[in-house]
Image (tube, rainbow, N blue to C red):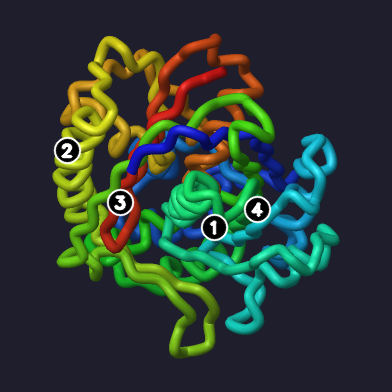
Amino acid sequence: MKFNNVALHSIRLSLPEEIWTSEYIENQFADTYQSMRLSVGRLELMTGIRERRVWSPDFLPSVEAGKVGKALLDDSGIAPGKIGLLMHCGVCRDRLEPATASYVHHQIGLPQCVQIMDLSNACLGFINGMIVAASMIESGLIEAALIVTAENSRGLLENTIRSIRGLPANRNAIKPYFANLTIGSGAVAALLCHSRLSSGIARLQSAVVRTDSSHHGLCEGGHSDTGAGHEMLTDSESLLIAGIRLASATWADFKSSTGWTDDSIRHTLCHQVGKMHQAALYDTLGIDRAKDFSIYPELGNMGSAALPATLSEAVEANLFNSGDRFAMLGIGSGITSMMLALQWQ
């Protein structure tokens, strides 16, 4: 997919104030660790994640997505009437019906002519949203789109801690739950528009996607049948191997689609899972790790918010110079790999 007229106008991240360190989480099941002869510190050592944020217990995705979306739009200089599409792209939603986007639409005060939808694809839903919006802008169907997400890790972390406390003294028993402990919280909004409306901060040039659904069972989450709340079980090792294999093929597609070489790519931003996944991805693809910009040590894996949050933080850090080419690289359970090519204005 190639784009000639799509600008990333602006992007914004909002974070909760409450911080849970990896040490704090592990101390909640220290007795279980002791029975398994494991020591506190293992979580940070293996993942590189020191801390993550959590929203308050009364969190609703639409409230936080609406706040960050409204703040972004208010500061954009783009009239609400120019927005043709609003998408909420999170794993977390207010409820099954109506669409969480309807609550966000009302909170922001968008016109009735704006199409709304929820779009979900695990950790890559936001990137899916960018591609859908860009395609609609490129085709002339709309002039601008607002994409939002708000993810909350509190419920999953709390339920995982309770589950681990009840596990038998067996290291293999804890493995399917370990990935849950890396999850963080945050809300992101991005505004995409036709380049005639605004040159924005970057131009979206290309997107490539590959899906290998034979691995759909490697990471599965949902509401517990026992009523205990949200739960997720992950075969992290198999997911890593399959994900890197798929990403390698997607990376070849990316370079073929863009014509970019390793030397011409100034920066890379990847989905924030942890240090082991990041190292495996870059080593396999042959990408210089010095080109990476990461936020996972302080924020963990924020699901669909992770990759756009990384871009937002890179913008705040003044990472980019005019003309810089950068790639956004994502792997999500299911499994899907998506990669976006952008150039800084």
Name the image quarter holding the C terminus.
Answer: top right
Does residue 13 appear to the left or right of 26 in the view shown? right
Calculate the distance from the C-alpha at mark 3 to the C-alpha at mark 4.
29 Å
Q: Is residue 116 above or below residue 241?
A: below
Q: Earlier in the sequence, mark 4 or mark 1?
A: 1
Label 2, residues with CA under 10 Å away: few <14, some 14-19, many ≥20: some
> Would residue 44 appear left or right of 208 to someone viewing this image?
right
Evaluate if marks 4 and 1 touch, with contact meaning CB atoms under 8 Å apart: no
Foreground residue among 153 and 194: 194
| Residue 248 image label | 2
Please tell me whether mark 4 or mark 1 is closer to you in this view.
4
Residue located beneath label 3 in the image: 37
Q: Nearer the viewer, mark 1 or mark 2?
A: 2
Q: According to the image, label 4 marks what residue?
A: 54
Q: What secondary structure is marked by label 2?
A: helix
Q: Is residue 188 above or below residue 296?
A: below
Residue 28, which numbered label? Answer: 1
